[in-house]
Image (spheres, helix red, strand yellow):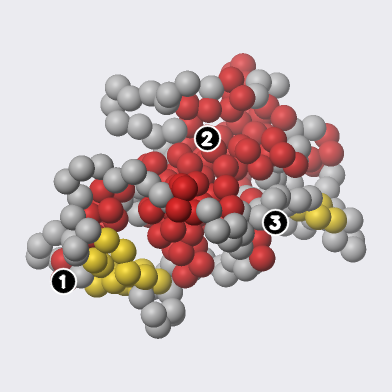
Amino acid sequence: MPAINEQSISLRDNGSQGDTDRLLPPGLCLKTTIQVFAGEEPEPFIIHKDILCASSDFFKNACKEPWKESAGVVELSGTEPRLFEVYARWLYSPDVLNLMEKPVVTTAANGAISVPAYEPLFHLYALGDMLQDSKFKNAILDKIVEVRRLVNYHPICFSAFVYSELPPSSPLRRLYVDFWVGSSASDWFNTKNPADDCNSPDAPMEFFRDVLRQSKTGGAGKKLWEEDICQYHEHPAGIKCQK
């Protein structure tokens, strides 16, 4: 996984995080911790075991006997430390995502347009998928839609990442296709950014087939994420988003 631009994922420290602390469910033990080593970072993240396992099925399973991780040390060698730091902070204060820098649209010297805030969010979603943390994925997906509303510019350069890092059943994969089907215009196919889906040789043919299929089966022009964002969330059976 490529390194993430540090500026695009920085968190503003406004000194008010105490107001956003997670209300912990009863029965959680705050005496046992886990050391999580991310990437090449020599210093571990130290997180309360019950908080981690209550949110992540990956850690819940990893901490069971007879796995070596049950001893209290978990190594995530392929994980960007700055990404895991955001996840670790979110475990204790979910509102930490609101402290991310305000998204902006940037224009390069060659006229290529991009929104730096999208990249870490897509990578954070993939991290949540690996950690099997549905609540975290739902929160990140909501943030992606929020950024789209704030900047009025869609993410259009992540098809290769989405299709290589996420399974076919992934809600973010479906949302990404719906972005294209519901909002794409002619200028999406005539951009100056070589990384954009329409220009990149890495953009998978499967993605364009999915866009075409969805367009021809009644999805064209429909902004489904605005109608009901809960359809892109993962919840236990029978649970729906609170309105």
Q: Earlier in the sequence, mark 1 or mark 3?
A: 1
Q: Residue at x 83, y 34 (%)?
A: 186
Residue 155 numbered mark, or none: none
Lateral position of residue 171 relative to residue 156, left or right: left
Mark 2: secondary structure: helix
Q: Residue at x 36, y 75 (%)?
A: 44
Residue 133, percent from left and from top? 36, 47
Q: Residue at x 58, y 27 (%)?
A: 225
Q: Which is nearer the eye, 226 or 202?
A: 226
Q: Residues within 10 Å of mark 1 (few under 14, many from 20)?
A: some
Q: Which is nearer the eye, 106 or 182?
A: 106
Lateral position of residue 218 relative to residue 75, left or right: right
Q: Which is nearer the eye, 239 or 225?
A: 239
Q: Residues within 10 Å of mark 2 (few under 14, many from 20)?
A: some
- Residue on which the image places disc 2: 174
Lateral position of residue 80 relative to residue 207, left or right: left
Residue 235, percent from left and from top? 35, 32
Mark 3 vs mark 2: in front:
3
Q: Quadrant of residue 71?
A: bottom left
Mark 1 vs mark 2: in front:
1
Labels 1 and 2 touching (C-beta < 8 A): no
- Residue on which the image places disc 1: 71
Task: Say whether residue 166 is visible.
Answer: no
Q: Quadrant of residue 220?
A: top right
Whole-angstrom CA distance, mark 1 to mark 2, is 38 Å
- Residue on which the image places disc 3: 116
Tell me the kind of residue under disc 3: Pro
Whole-angstrom CA distance, mark 1 to mark 3, is 39 Å
Whole-angstrom CA distance, mark 3 to mark 2, is 22 Å
Q: Earlier in the sequence, mark 1 or mark 2?
A: 1
